[in-house]
């Protein structure tokens, strides 16, 4: 810990909250720039929705959501339409304030008109979401799953999932929502921070009982009931990979802004907490992603009225210690050094063999002789990894979904000045010109109008006033418009894929031409 500031460079920097440190030029940081912003309720909903527009079937693991206040009229209209087309649909909605956590400010409603309005429109930015009314119950209780995911690298994408997680239980038996029980948080919300205050909360040392259990104990129960646990795991892995694929385009924009390519800087990794709800039919649904999952392995216990003490929580310890230990093992800088040294020894040895006089350098000779001091137990002494690689392992299955990464690469190419996250009007014009997207039907004047219309709308949503210009989501919207114009009859994802391929081809041809001219 460096309460007074840090002077020496480190191998690994473990930040408490977010990536905010302009003084790091090497090593690895446990946070990605922009991750906290990306997993806020509104930003995550937007990123998933864009993917739902492109690939509706693949992204049906996230409840239908609307962003308030700006989509309130859309929410009202869509719900009315859905109710008209299916009168038996009796939905409940959950309203979650943006940036909230631990169940803070969350409430349930049966009808859009029940949303607490200040005047006519809700003021505090929030996400309103279809409430999953039929969750899987264990011991008649609703529960959710907290899974730990290590994003080890963004480029190339590397994802690991912890083999075990936590199941957090409600403390009142579940009933489907009715007007009478809507406000009963101990029945509907699984947050530990809320349920701990219920008289029914059970602290348990056993991973199979109590209000917080290991996910593996739930899987055992399900398996003994004959559930297809293998399929459940594979659905969870897909959910995690697809969610991260939805986040990577914007994360890359943040990354190039904070750590510009070619300049010295750290690499990043991050442990994320995925909150997942299982439906009655065992389909996993994403509730949210946490950029700062709690790593506490203790809980507070009231010894006598008003006297609290921190006591170890074996369930938390079992899951979380393994996650941190294995994250450190995977990002271990010594591992890379050991590999480099081994290569250097091998290289020295082969040179020495060739020249027959052993000229191994002092460093390699010392290493070859072995340590003079006793070394700590090596990796062989540690338990097997709890973090399981899922990407690139399953990359082939998911690569077609990474379309927006390619759109983001085009966006980043035209950002121009390093360190920005927004595209100026000139950058947008250059993009159109270099990709040969303007023609007699689409003049440069129309290009400017498209830029102004979309940029103004996105900036009026009040997401980020620090910089002016077109953000990535606005660029994606403009890109979709251009794709629809150019490839009218295709489905949206094919329109976008065709336009991406067209732009990449034009830019590659331009680069080639410039290279030839340069040589000339
Ligand atoms: P917070 O960040 O405040 O914890 P969450 O999105 O995790 O917000 O929601 C809090 C709790 O509300 C969840 O743990 C879950 O029990 C419940 N919940 C959230 N969204 C839904 C939903 N769409 N359907 C059913 N329950 C939900």
Image (cartoon, rainbow, N blue to C red):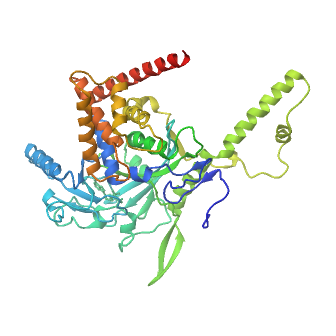
Left or right: residue 58 versus residue 266 is: left
Residue 219 relative to residue 328: left or right? left
Question: Can residue 159 be seen by looking at this rendering?
Answer: yes
In front here: 189 or 442?
442
Q: Quadrant of the C terminus?
A: top right
Could you say which quadrant of the image residue 492 lies in?
Answer: top left
Could you say where residue 246 lies in the image, as x and y percent from the top left?
37, 41
Q: Quadrant of residue 434?
A: top left
Q: Position of residue 281 (x, y in %)?
A: 29, 45
Q: Position of residue 375 (x, y in %)?
A: 78, 51
Question: Observer-nearest residue: 173 or 429?
Answer: 429
How many badges with numbers are in the image? Answer: 0
Examine the image and state in which quarter residue 198 appears: bottom left
400 lies left or right of 153: left
Image-quarter location of ligand 1: bottom left
Q: Residue furthest bottom?
A: 305
From this viewpoint, is residue 239 visible? no
Residue in view at x 43 percent, y 44 percent: 420
Tell which of 136 and 119 is nearer to you.
119
Q: Position of residue 34 (x, y in %)?
A: 44, 50
Q: Is 372 situated left or right of 34 in this image?
A: right
Residue shown at the point (37%, 44%) measured from the top left = 226
Of 475 and 513, nearer the camera is: 513
**Vertical order, 56 against 170 (above or below):** above
Look at the image and tell me in which quarter the N terminus lies.
bottom right
The vertical placement of 410 against 489, above or below, is below
Q: Which residue reaches farthest right?
A: 357
């Amino acid at each position: 810990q460096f309460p007074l500031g840090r002077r020496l460079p480190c191998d690994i920097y473990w930040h408490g909250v977010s990536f905010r440190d302009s003084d790091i030029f090497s090593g690895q940081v446990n946070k990605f720039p922009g991750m906290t912003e990306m997993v806020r309720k509104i930003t995550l909903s937007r990123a998933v929705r864009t993917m739902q527009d492109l690939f509706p079937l693949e992204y049906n693991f996230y409840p239908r959501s609307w962003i308030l206040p700006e989509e309130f009229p859309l929410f009202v209209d869509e719900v009315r339409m859905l109710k008209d087309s299916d009168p038996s649909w009796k939905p409940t909605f959950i309203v979650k304030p943006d940036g909230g956590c631990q169940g803070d400010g969350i409430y349930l409603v049966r009808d859009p008109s029940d949303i607490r309005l200040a005047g006519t429109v809700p003021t505090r930015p929030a996400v309103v979401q279809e409430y999953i009314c039929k969750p899987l119950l264990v011991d008649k209780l609703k529960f959710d799953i907290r899974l730990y995911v290590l994003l080890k690298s963004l480029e190339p994408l590397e994802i690991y999932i912890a083999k075990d997680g936590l199941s957090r239980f409600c403390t009142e038996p579940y009933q489907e929502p009715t007007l009478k029980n809507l406000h009963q948080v101990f029945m509907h919300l699984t947050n530990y921070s809320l349920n701990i205050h219920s008289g029914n909360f059970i602290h348990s040392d056993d991973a199979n009982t109590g209000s917080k259990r290991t996910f593996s104990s739930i899987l055992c129960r399900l398996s003994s009931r004959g559930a297809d646990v293998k399929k459940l795991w594979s659905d969870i892995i897909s959910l995690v990979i697809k969610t991260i694929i939805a986040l990577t385009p914007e994360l890359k924009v943040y990354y190039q802004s904070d750590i510009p390519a070619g300049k010295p800087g750290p690499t990043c990794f991050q442990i994320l907490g995925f909150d997942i709800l299982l439906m009655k039919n065992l389909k996993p649904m994403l509730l949210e992603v946490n950029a700062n999952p709690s790593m506490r392995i203790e809980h507070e216990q009231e010894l006598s009225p008003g006297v609290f003490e921190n006591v170890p929580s074996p369930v938390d310890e079992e899951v979380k210690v393994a996650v941190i230990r294995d994250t450190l093992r995977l990002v271990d800088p010594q591992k890379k050094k050991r590999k480099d040294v081994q290569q250097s020894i091998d290289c020295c040895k082969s040179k020495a063999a060739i020249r027959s006089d052993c000229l191994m350098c002092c460093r390699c000779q010392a290493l070859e002789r072995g340590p003079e001091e006793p070394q700590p137990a090596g990796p062989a002494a540690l338990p097997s990894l709890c973090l399981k690689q899922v990407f690139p392992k399953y990359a082939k299955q998911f690569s077609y979904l990474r379309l927006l990464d390619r759109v983001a690469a085009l966006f980043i190419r035209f950002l121009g000045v390093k360190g920005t996250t927004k595209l100026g009007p000139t950058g947008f014009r250059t993009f159109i010109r270099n990709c040969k997207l303007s023609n007699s039907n689409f003049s440069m004047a129309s290009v400017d109008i498209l830029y102004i219309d979309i940029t103004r709308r996105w900036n009026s949503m009040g997401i980020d006033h620090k910089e002016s210009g077109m953000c990535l989501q606005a660029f994606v919207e403009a890109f979709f418009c251009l794709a629809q114009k150019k490839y009218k009859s295709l489905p949206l994802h094919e329109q976008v894929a065709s336009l991406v391929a067209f732009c990449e081809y034009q830019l590659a041809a331009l680069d080639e031409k410039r290279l030839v001219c340069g040589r000339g």
